[in-house]
Amino acid sequence: MMHRYPTGMRALRLGALVLAGLLLALLAACSSAPRQPDPTPLQPVPPILHVAKAWSAHIGAVAPNLRIAVAGSRVVVASNDGQVRCLRADDGATLWRSQVAGGVSAGVGSDGSFSAVVNQDNQVVALGPQGQVLWRYRLPTSVLTAPAVFGGMIIVQGADEHLWAFNAATGALLWDDAFEPPSLLLQRGSGIVRVGDALVLGDASGHLRALRLRDGTSLWDSMLVQPRGFTDVERLVAITGAPAVAQSTVCARAYQTGLGCLSLADGHLLWSAQANGYTGVSQDGKLLVATQADGVVQSYAVADGKPGWHNDQLKWRDLSAPLLLGHTVAVGDLHGYVSFLDAGSGRIIGRVSTDGSAIASPLALAGKTLVVLTRDGAVYGFVPR
């Protein structure tokens, strides 16, 4: 299942992708959209949920495409300047640290034994159990999505929709596959998740795909949201954020267009709904929670998409993706606060502060510890009680 391109064709393809990315960036910069309203001031929170800070650490500044990797009791984080650190989830102790030459543009993926990032020279960099660099592989495209590491395999999704699977220990290319990208590419990462012997990922065309992990064979391919409008910008429906998997469903967000859920078994679309947002979603098989572009936190029924509660007390606070934590929902904001909402009613029941910079990465749960990473590189472990 190996796909190759002639050198000239690959160069033309990559040139077109670079031009498309630049065009999208220019369109975003030159937008005539009205100025966003000021963030809604935070109101006092009743002391219903107590959240204790268990530990904190610090790495360098963190870009939006860098993610927290959780593997059992280990947490792996990376900074723009190439620092990669593995922390123990319960007390924040540093288990190993590494320095990746060329900085980090996408990461981190980890299975506890192997970790992977992509540096700013488009090289996949594999790290061993003690953070030692094992091998590098230069890709012919940039990478926006954190590599995924599953059972000794490293999976990388290029910005041009190409997929590569490597042996984590040796760097041997196990399989690769290419999908046709749209004419415009969103400069945001999505995510790759493992479901048994398969992996599920989103693409820039609004599709969710399931592939067999061992050889990349397609299991199903379904469109989450249909493109609308006439221009390429209006028809942009890239999947943003990692797909959320629970029980028999997978749910995801299409950038500023909609969200919905599919059957894990065959990719059958259960429902989709219009929703303007740009972060991933969280679900537990019954309840799905999403943060919208205006800062409203909205719940839906996973079975049929029926809207439930919504909370507008955090409007215009540039919210992170939400994270369901049993009976609560955690969400971070642009000033480094993490608010906790009751999952049954949407009422805010707790809040913690960090270093004052924006929450840069989706929140992550490692055992009983909520791990938070800020734009300035502060890493926190919180334990809700």
Image (cartoon, rainbow, N blue to C red):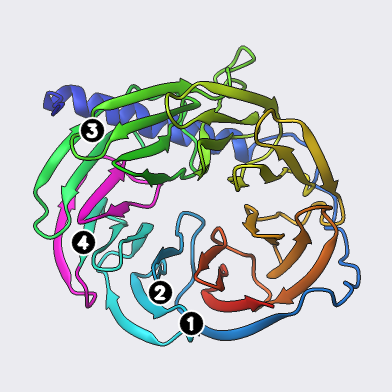
> Which residue is labeled 3 in the image?
216
Quadrant location, the N terminus: top left
Tell me whether circle 2 and circle 4 mark residues in contact (CB < 8 Å): no
In the visual, does 114 lie left or right of 329? left
Q: Disc 1 designates what residue?
A: 90
Q: How far apart are marks 1 and 4 (CA)?
A: 25 Å
> What type is the residue that disc 2 sits on?
Ser
Give yes or no for contact between labels 2 and 3 (Cβ–Cβ under 8 Å).
no
Q: In which quarter of the image is residue 119?
A: bottom left
Span shown in magenta: 128-157
Q: Above or below — where is 114 with respect to 299?
A: below
Describe residue 117's horizontal placement relative to residue 384 as left or right.
Answer: left
At 50% from the left and 26% from the top, the residue drawn is 206
Q: Label 2 vs label 3: CA separation?
A: 29 Å
| Residue 34 appears in view | no
Residue named by callout 2: 73
Which badge, 1 or 4, comes first in the chain's sequence?
1
- SS under mark 1: loop
Which mark sits nearer the N-terminus, 4 or 3?
4
* Mark 2 or 4, nearer chain start: 2
Q: How far apart, in angstroms, are the residues tagged by discs 3 and 1?
A: 36 Å
Q: Which residue is drawn at 46% across and 32% down?
A: 264
Q: Residues within 10 Å of mark 4 (few under 14, many from 20)?
A: many
- Residue 111 screen position, x and y as percent: 30, 62
